[in-house]
Image (tube, grey):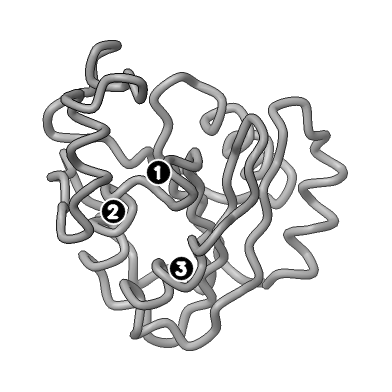
Amino acid sequence: MKKILVAYFSCTGTTRRVAQGLAAAVGADVYEITPAVPYTRADLDWTDSSSRSSIEMKDASSRPEIAGRVDNMDDYDAVFVGFPIWWYVAPHIVDTFLESYDFSGKTVVPFATSGGSGMGRTEAVLKECCASSTVWGKGRVFKVGVSENELADWAKKSV
């Protein structure tokens, strides 16, 4: 049986709920990707071009620092990585996470939450950040009300 980690970044709780449902559905461990400097409501105001999230997302090289690490990453066979869609891609803190570990021999599968957009070019961008991954699973966008059964069915096909 594969040992699975669900790592996720969530500012509003939407991605957290999906990540926790996914972890419960497949019996996975959970790790929250937490920024070293937490985002405030003002930081997340995408309508303000001078907000922190707007500035970070305009700079493809931005890598917000993460507070903490997964201590036992080598123990996992598969890692699901969840995040909200920001500007049609994953927030750059997810790039930071993927670039912080060696995923050799692991299956990495992205999942996202979004109010309306799809994955956009997210998978291509993240795959570059995770070049050491042996297998890159097909990502999917979920709505907040997704059932554990739907998550379990998708997950089983992905790893």
> How many numbered tags mark residues here?
3
Q: CA distance from mark 3 to mark 2?
A: 10 Å
- Which amino acid lies under the numbered mark 2 shown in the image of this protein? Val
Residue 46 drawn at (x, y percent): 35, 25
- Which amino acid lies under the numbered mark 1 shown in the image of this protein? Tyr
| Residue at image location 16% in from the left, 39% down from the top | 67
User: Which residue is label 3 attached to?
Assistant: 76
User: Which residue is label 1 attached to?
Assistant: 31
Q: Residue pushed farthest top?
A: 41
Q: Is residue 155 left or right of residue 113?
A: right
Residue contact between numbered discs 2 and 1, judged by CB atoms under 8 Å: yes
Residue 71 drawn at (x, y percent): 25, 56
Residue 157 drawn at (x, y percent): 79, 69
User: Who is closer to the viewer here, 68 or 123?
Assistant: 123
If you read the primary sequence from the N terminus, does the residue marked by circle 3 or circle 2 appear first? 2
| Residue at image location 87% in from the left, 43% down from the top | 149
User: Who is closer to the viewer here, 118 or 37?
Assistant: 118
Say what secondary structure mark 2 lies in.
loop
Q: Quadrant of the N terminus?
A: bottom right
Q: Quadrant of residue 41?
A: top left
| Residue at image location 48% in from the left, 61% down from the top | 122
Say what secondary structure mark 3 lies in.
loop
Residue contact between numbered discs 1 and 3, judged by CB atoms under 8 Å: no
Marking on residue 95: none
| Residue at image location 77% in from the left, 26% down from the top | 145
Q: Quadrant of residue 52?
A: top left
Q: Is residue 20 left or right of residue 155?
A: left
User: Which residue is label 2 attached to?
Assistant: 70
- Which amino acid lies under the numbered mark 3 shown in the image of this protein? Tyr
Residue 158 drawn at (x, y percent): 71, 69
